[in-house]
Image (cartoon, rainbow, N blue to C red):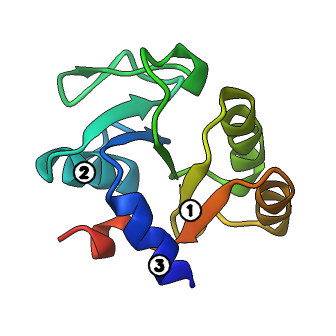
């Protein structure tokens, strides 16, 4: 079931990566870069940076110029629960949870709010 959800999300072309970073060794950078390289429109979201890889970075999902179709989580679950609440508030219905970002609270919240989740690594899924 999770693979089907992941495939459907990969068909969507406007993404946000929450936890994007300028550190090229971190997943937040690698995922952002991989999506961009594969033709996705990707918004980096991080309160720490003004730009990532030459692109404007945004402090929060609500600051984006458009609502992304998918939000990729590259943050600790303690931060992730706040992010999924923002997703709900903005009407975002698809979240991609990288390994290490998942918690029961996030999954339960997503289920209660009818937000579709995929649990997988984008780096593996997008080649």
Count neighbours of disc 3 (C-alpha within 10 A) and say few if under 14, some if 14 to 19, many if 20 or more: few
Q: Are marks 1 and 3 in contact (CB under 8 Å)?
A: no
Does residue 19 sit above or below 46 in this rendering? below
Does the image show residue 121? no
Dot 2 corresponds to which residue? 35
Give me the residue at 57% from left, 53% from top. 95
Which mark sits nearer the N-terminus, 3 or 2? 3
The quadrant where residue 16 appears:
top left
Q: Position of residue 54 (x, y in %)?
A: 17, 23
Q: CA distance from mark 3 to mark 2?
A: 19 Å
Give me the residue at 30% from left, 76% from top. 124
Give me the residue at 61% from left, 63% from top. 117
Does residue 91 sit above or below 1 in this rendering? above
Q: Quadrant of the C terminus?
A: bottom left
Count neighbours of disc 1 (C-alpha within 10 A) and say few if under 14, some if 14 to 19, many if 20 or more: many
Of residues 114 and 80, the one nearer the viewer is 114
Dot 3 corresponds to which residue? 4
Per the rendering, the mark at residue 97 is 1
Question: Horizontally, is 6 left or right of 29 in the view?
Answer: right
């Amino acid at each position: 079931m999770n693979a089907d959800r992941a495939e459907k999300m990969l068909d969507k072309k406007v993404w946000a990566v929450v936890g994007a970073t300028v550190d090229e060794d971190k997943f937040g950078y690698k995922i952002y870069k991989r999506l961009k390289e594969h033709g996705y429109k990707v918004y980096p979201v991080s309160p720490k940076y003004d730009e990532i890889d030459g692109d404007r970075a945004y402090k929060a999902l609500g600051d984006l110029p458009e609502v992304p179709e998918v939000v990729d989580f590259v943050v600790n679950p303690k931060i992730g629960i706040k992010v999924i609440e923002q997703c709900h508030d903005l009407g975002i219905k698809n979240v991609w949870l990288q390994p290490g970002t998942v918690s029961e609270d996030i999954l339960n919240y997503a289920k209660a709010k009818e937000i579709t989740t995929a649990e997988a690594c984008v780096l593996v899924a997008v080649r």
